[in-house]
Image (spheres, rainbow, N blue to C red):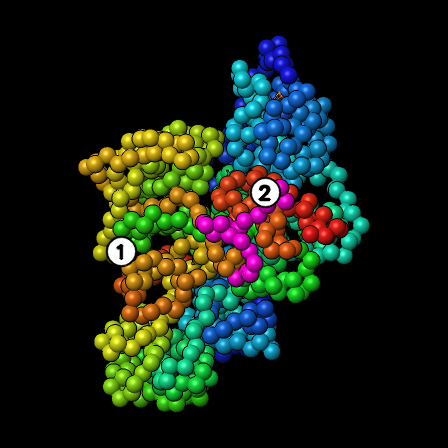
Amino acid sequence: MAEKPEKKEKTPRQPMPEQEPKARARNFEEVPYGYGPEAAVKEAERCLQCKNPACVDGCPVAVDIPGFINLIKQGEFARSISKIWEKNSLPAVCGRVCPQEMQCEGRCIIGKKGEPVAIGNLERFAADFARKSGECELPTLAQPTGKRVAVVGSGPAGLTVAGDLILKGHQVTIYEAFHKPGGVLVYGIPEFRLPKEIVFSEVAALENMGVKLELNQVIGRTITVEELFAEGFDAVFLGVGAGLPRFLNVPGENLIGIYSANEYLTRSNLMKAYRFPEYDTPIIKGRKVITLGAGNVAMDAARTALRLGAESSSIVYRRSREEVPARAAEVHHAEEEGVQFHFLTAPVKFLGNEKGRLTGMVGLKMALGEPDDSGRRRPVEIKGSEFEMECDLAIIAVGANANPLLTRSTEGLQLNKWGYIVADEATGKTSRKAVWAGGDIVTGSATVILAMGAGRKAADSIHDYLVRGW
Amino acid sequence: MFKIVRREEMSGGTVVLNEIEAPLIARKAKPGQFVIIKANETGERVPLTMADTDPVKGTITLIYMVVGKSTALFKTLKVGEGYQDIIGPLGKPTHLENVGTAVCVGGGTGIAVLHPITRGLKQAGNKVISIIGARSKNILILEDQMRAVSDELHVCTDDGSYGHHGFVTEVLKTVLDKNKVGLVVGIGPVPMMKFVSKITKDYGVKTLVSLNPIMIDGTGMCGGCRVTVGGKTQFACVDGPEFDGHLVDFDELTLRLQAYCEDEKECYNNFCTLKA
Ligand SMILES: Cc1cc2nc3c(=O)[nH]c(=O)nc-3n(C[C@H](O)[C@H](O)[C@H](O)COP(=O)(O)OP(=O)(O)OC[C@H]3O[C@@H](n4cnc5c(N)ncnc54)[C@H](O)[C@@H]3O)c2cc1C
Ligand code: SF4
Ligand code: FES
């Protein structure tokens, strides 16, 4: 349907108020402050209220975007969050971390000629408003069904399943290996991008509705899936994430001063090493820091390094700027804060001193060749272009593989050749009866919203099974 | 909270034993496996291999040496108090089989970890010869317990205050000379495990060592615990903690264990000043 954007597009996209780059590069407080009500209403007024909204097509969970934006426009903030909750149970998180430019905002009709409606910022506004004011209707629980569901992993996939099923009247217990719930939202994504208080308040809301949370339980070790069924659970959802760091397999990789991004970020975020010695977990701070990779994880690591006092923090990436997989906002923020980018550069080896500590990295220049399977142009080595970069901290952020701890200890689970669980795309059903899976352990490292989308589909299917059968 | 139900000090207070209520872990744990413990909200996650478990009582026993801030903090915990978080059992259990004659070599608090493995090897029908050592008699631990599960027990002290005057490795040589040995298990400080492995390599006897690198999650998620074994990187928390001693790069492990020395000192000093 053709809309007429020319007439309405008068107000510019409301800028997001943010901490000034120089200051924020040295603290762990959240970078954007969020819209105030006035800016939110103004931004909401930019929306054309399309009859066939393209933005909704771009949303993996099909939030009624014009619907909630319209409520913001009318100042009905509390009702606006209820609208979002119909489809998305973690809007305060998604408003902050979704790659909107590739989803809703990337499709927004206004974006064709100018800047798209700031859907992410508005979603965040509605969620923050609800959390701060406490002004919103709590959803009502359905009649108890007497059925019990075990959810393994408390990342976005697991939390979504738990939230959906508790509303439908089932008893839900979440089992989490770590001592804190939230998955990557807590151990991976830093405070300055997603304050942990937000994640914990989402989890607290689930607990208030009756979800039981069992921390420090490694399923496959402390308890097995078999034992969960033996204990009387009727269905099990596996949302254990990817969780096995990839290394480069280059010489010198075990020197002190080389971390996987998982270790670096877990030390800083989950263990609060950035507040050492108030917290007991130490972290190597690094003066000259190199991060290998250019996804969201790499941006988080490089920006954390600055906040821990690095003089320089560089991203080293094999491909070119066009292929950078991180959210546009993260790259923008990283650059503003002074992270340097070395594109078309591959690590060859790491250099160390007699104490086994990292002192440098040998890199190799690359050129772009023919497109590969992913359609991205394949980087090829330029012979003889080796050069040395000084560094005392290197963070490897080149992706994750499937962690086999749970899958190996569970019988009857079909895995693909990379070790991820095979699950039906529409329902999340695995090859084993009464076991569902979703999120990164099925798709490989993806996004928060895709994990939540998978959780929602699985929850629907689990509910169907509990009332009707497999 | 995981409650401490029994507490003992050993080695003149430098080593502490805690028996802790952890029924789920006690039910599952096998010799050679470890737990990760964290005392309180601001605490560090510390891996400790279990010295004993009692599935009936639902308890696990940990024995640790007080070496830094975290263990100094653990030491302040009394019976009735406890740990905020304990995760486990983690790692692969020791493969306990009948090899004929097995030799168990332990040093320092490594003896605590060795004890359940020694008992397991004995129960598997082996003739078990144990060699344990300490710097001095007054800090030697678990002598009686080790004697109870061994066919032969040799004790060594570095200063000659008790038993053989010298290192466990010297006794190990004589034992290997006199017996046809199917397996050696060596658990203790890294240099001890390194030299035990060196000797047994010359004798061509299969050797297991239990490694204790720095860990965070204990589930294979961070790679902080990586060790080089046979030229390949392995994660001690999921691929180990026990490895073939002949293949382990002990020098790399020694260096990696030093990663936070300076920080640890800072943290420990802070803690001591606060307490004083
Ligand atoms: C640093 C970083 C930054 C990111 N930034 C973004 C971003 O900006 N936007 C975005 O959309 N996505 C981002 N992602 C990706 C996104 O976080 C993940 O795709 C998403 O969290 C996957 O959710 P999940 O529920 O599948 O798993 P996870 O979030 O990984 O949660 C899995 C949970 O299961 C637990 N677990 C694992 N094994 C067991 C077991 N055996 N027993 C019990 N519990 C277990 C884990 O401890 C964990 O808590 C980022 C990822 C990282 C690491
Ligand atoms: S956000 Fe954009 S695409 Fe969606 S309804 Fe509004 S104007 Fe249309
Ligand atoms: S402790 Fe993190 S992978 Fe072993």
Q: Which residue sits furthest right?
A: A143
Answer yes or no: are tags 2 and 1 on the same subunit.
yes
Element on which disc 2 rests = loop
Q: Is residue B51 above or below residue A133?
A: below
Decide whether residue B39 is among the magenta residues. no
Residue placed under numbered mark 2 in the picture: A425
Residue placed under numbered mark 1 in the picture: A356
Q: Residue B151: which quarter of the image?
A: bottom left
Q: Which x, y percent locates residue A346?
A: 30, 39
Q: What segment is highlighted magenta in the picture?
A: A409-427
Task: Say what amino acid the circle numbered 1 marks.
Answer: Gly
Q: Which x, y percent locates residue A86?
A: 70, 36
Q: Earlier in the sequence, mark 2 or mark 1?
A: 1
**Front-most of residues A66 and A351:** A66
Q: Which x, y percent locates residue A412?
A: 56, 58
**Front-most of residues A230 and A396:** A230
Q: Which residue sits furthest top?
A: A7
Residue at left 65%, top 38%?
Answer: A88
**Disc 2 packing (10 Å; few <14; some 14–19; many ≥20):** some
In the rendered view of the protein, which quadrant contains the N terminus of chain A?
top right
Residue at left 42%, top 44%?
Answer: A399
Q: Which mark is residue A109?
A: none
Decide whether residue A423 is among the magenta residues. yes
Taking the image as shown, residue A308 lies to the left or right of residue A242, namely: left
Task: Say what amino acid the circle numbered 2 marks.
Answer: Glu
Q: Which x, y percent locates residue B92?
A: 45, 67
**Front-most of residues A119 and A277:** A119
